[in-house]
Amino acid sequence: MARGGIEGSSDQALGLMQAGRWSDAERVYRELIGQMHVINYEYDDWLRNLVEVYKQLGRSYETAVVQLYLHYFDLAKAALRGTQQGGVDQPAMLARVAETEKRWTEAAELFAKAKLPMHAAVALERAELKDQTAPAWLSIVQAEASKLRPYEAALVHFNYGMAAAKLDVKSDEARRALIESQRKLEQVADDFETSGEYERAFDCFQILLRLGKESGQFENLAEGYVNCIRVLASDNLKFYVLQYYEDFVRLALERDEYQAAATVLQEAAAYSARVSLPYDRHYQTKAAKAWLRSAENSATVGAPPQMIENAMLAAASQFSAVGDYSSVRQVFDRLASLELGDRSKKRYAAIASKFVSMQGPALEAPGLPDYLKQQQAYADIWFADLLEWEMQGDPAAVASSIVGDLRYPNGIRRRALVILLTIAQANRSQSRTDAAVEIRLAELLGELQSYAALAPLEKLFASTEPSIRRAAVKSLRYLYFKRSFVMLRKALADDDEAVRSAAVVAIGGLHFPHAFNPLSRLFRESTDERVRRACLESIGKIASIEAAEFLIGVLRQTEGPLRDAAFTALRGIDNADALPILRQYAEVEHNQAVRDMLAQLVRRYS
Amino acid sequence: MPIPVEQRRSPLARQVSSMVLSHVQTDAPMAMVRAAAWHNALARTGVSLPLFIVHDLGVILSMSRGAGGYELGPRTVQLQRIAPAPAARGHIDGYRRLLQNISESDIAERLSGMRLRDELIGVLLARVVGDTYNRWRDKSRTGGQAAMPLDLEVFSDIDYAGHFADFDQRPLWSFLEHVVNQAMNVYTQVELIDLDTVRLLGMFKDGAGGQAAMGGTIDLVDLFAALGSPEAHDVANFSLDLLPSVLETTRSAGAQTFAVDGYASIERRGNVDSMVLSELAYPREIFDQKVVDNELLYYGRDKHREDERRLQYVIIDASASMRGQRQVFARGLALALIKKLTLKGDEIWLRFFDSRLHETMKMGRSGQVPVPYVLSFRSERGRNYGRVFRQLSGELGRLRADQKRNVVLYIITHGQCHIEPEIITQLKAHAFLYGIVVLPTGPLPEFVSMLDRQQIVEAATISNRNARQRRALDIVGDVTNDKQSAATSANVSRAGMKAAPAGDGI
């Protein structure tokens, strides 16, 4: 009895293969590998069969792509070396295979041959070939820097400076390159912030932070961390914020910057309390201890007694705030022994005596647990962004960088494989530039659900053909990144109504936590009621306290469909913390209709 | 009863009713009005306390104990009328002990001698009780009230216990219990008030009129931040270390009437050689009468015009790169520098910068320095020195072209401030450039050697009291010496300055 569904198609493909109907078998297998929820061994079986089909069809490139997915590196390379297909960049694909194998030196040579100098330089970095890395970046600085946008130019200078400094720490050239990079980054970060692209400004601050870390410059370290924290906090990424605070404090203490560390810890405590996380007392205790270390350090180097006194008083303030009065007494006892004059000494001794019978806190305050800290909190963006730039939004290049990379989940690698095979098929049928193919690629890129898909989609969005632009924008609904909003905003201003409608559809899909700021900004700036309603719906699905407060504000300040949309969105929010806020507003609301709506929501939440 | 019947259930009546629990008594009739002012100032910092606590703590911090001042003790008759429950009586006792502790504090005694203004007391109270208030569970139930009236009539002859019965006082008892539980924290916060910062606020006249009393018209938010920041306390200590030496300078001012420089005006007084010649044409009797009546006209003359037009422009890096000791040194030095330049009679502009040039604080010869602003300014952006100094160059160019100002630009920054040499060249066309680089890590930025004068402050200097003070005074002295004044008055002299030792690179 014939089976239906996936099993049926699988049987059909196998049958076609056994019958030697290779082209038909290829078509069915290509449809099959679009299935993302099939278990690995079954999926891989299909791929092995597909390899056989491609061999029979003489399609070496496709054979190599599938073998790269399967990590059959030697077979993939052999297939690529035998490829006759025009238009296929053989060295680039061979480089991808070598890169996936982590054969960095070979990858660097192949990337260079493929005229991808940035990829080559990054591969040399990975190979830790210091002698070759700096010249590779230098040649990019000399040949490419003027063609690059300021951000990428800054990255190239940064990479050259860092590579040159590895060869000679005191190198003037390295210093000049890093200063040039720093100047550009400062300017670009400011420009990004001004235009509301905070996530891109964040990238710049991350590089400054790295510069400070590597070169021992506390000024850049502080600049990078403080601004990264500011951007993360504005996105309400609470645990990242605390992780960055902790990392900054650790590095500041390593550099004997005790005062800066203590004030940062106080800021972390204030932030924790402000966002209702239970770590404020932990950070206050750590701040107190950092102030004591600051006092000890000041005493050791012969600093002014007032500086020691101020640091110890700051420690006492923090201990007092957490109820550790035993430590408060110890601090005042120590203050009484400083060279501060008799009056002060007597005063501090008298204060200490008032705490004699006081105890320390009963329980140690909890700190941020390790499992909430992200291992990927710091990305190598100085490489990643240049690689993206060099790929020029080419979907094949992007997909080939993913297909063999096991850091991506198999689901994403499978989608990348489908993209590569779709492009190969289009190349063979000479329909690569057809609108239908571009539209299909836009859909596949959206389904990739990966940050890497954004650059190719942005390129597709630059098309003069509205149907391609529409497909590109529609695909954004799967891409939960703040950068998605850059294209979205352009799409909302597009001349073509269908593109604008697709943008509204995309807004409806973008309801991830740090979409709150861009969504609320879109709501404020747009005059199109459809857009504003879509924003409210998505904000409602974010379901954070900030989202609830924003929606309450809209409910109170607007009327008609927008008020109804805000009400509906609020009704859907599943967050108990919103109840006190609703109650508070319900008590002070003057407008009877709004008060009724708020009361209804209070009842629902209660 | 002065609170009108229609306001018996108002927030004002609720606040006043809490005075039943007050344990500080004074004969001063204005004490209640001042308490209302403190309450309003506190509310503006987000802390909404019951009036009796504001009154009691505020009086202790602003008046002396004993005759003519305040006494500690309950309003016994009123308390009996409200008949507190036994548990509440325990909290009242705890509250009395807290007040006793605070009133014995040296800080309270010294503050009371400083004649602090109401806003400043309000901010001090926010510092003392703010943390305790913020940890109170029910604080949301106290917010959103209108400001209290500052009218003596309103607060006269009030029957507190009568009003007390009109309200549900559970939140009040809850807060009292919370305060008593946090009593040692409240007491500690009083002991941690930094008198040096308060003193520094008084050393610079603030607001119009230059009253002797401290804390004139000020930004409460800045003040709140300044009083709570340990770094601000370090700045204050540092400035106070420097100021005695700085204050030795005397200032000369006024129009001159002797015969040098060009004519500037027609005056009613002057020397014979400045008399307007046409005066001599009057008949003798009329001339004599004009002499007697002081009605003769004289030419007034220019007084060192380039000196009058000199602008001392201080810009301080406020970026996150200045975190820690760099910030302390930079701001402490800036305050001392400003004081010194003010005493010399120069006009001073002060600005912070990061990726923007922030608001210009213009200090005339009357010496109004926004100390809380300097102590507490916080950057909320990254850096963009290219943008800042290009903008500054444009502004200075206009100042020079339109107003013929001679500008001395002081740049106080760190070692990773990399201004492009071309921008420095542009700036040099408009101003004498004086750079102070604090705690550089690594080699100095390229632009530093292009400045007309520069000072480098190293870590070894900053961590030692005497060295730090000496270094700062060196800089202040160097900034205000005559050589530099001469150099700033004309471009011709600038070459000479460049030949002078360009900083000592300590």
Image (cartoon, coloured by chain):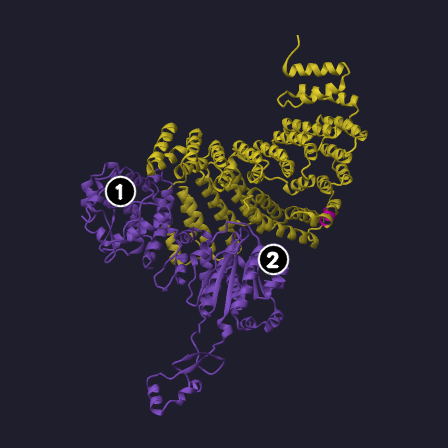
Chain colours: A yellow, B purple
Kindly identify which residue carries mark 1.
B92
Find out whether residue A448 is within the magenta segment: no
Residue A442, picture quadrant: top right
Amino acid at circle 2: Ile
Residue A450, picture quadrant: top right
Query: Magenta segment range?
Result: A137-141
Q: Is residue A22 left or right of residue A540?
A: right
Find out whether residue A138 is within the magenta segment: yes
Residue B360: which disc? Answer: none
User: Magenta stretch: dominant SS?
Assistant: helix
B165 over B498 or under it: above or below: above
Front-lying residue, A46 or A596: A596
Amino acid at circle 1: Ile
Q: Is residue A115 left or right of residue A292?
A: right
The reply to whether dot 2 and dot 1 touch (C-beta < 8 Å) is: no
Q: Is residue A136 left or right of residue B412?
A: right
Residue B442: x percent and y percent?
Answer: 62, 55
Q: Is residue A253 visible?
A: no
Q: Is residue A226 visible?
A: yes
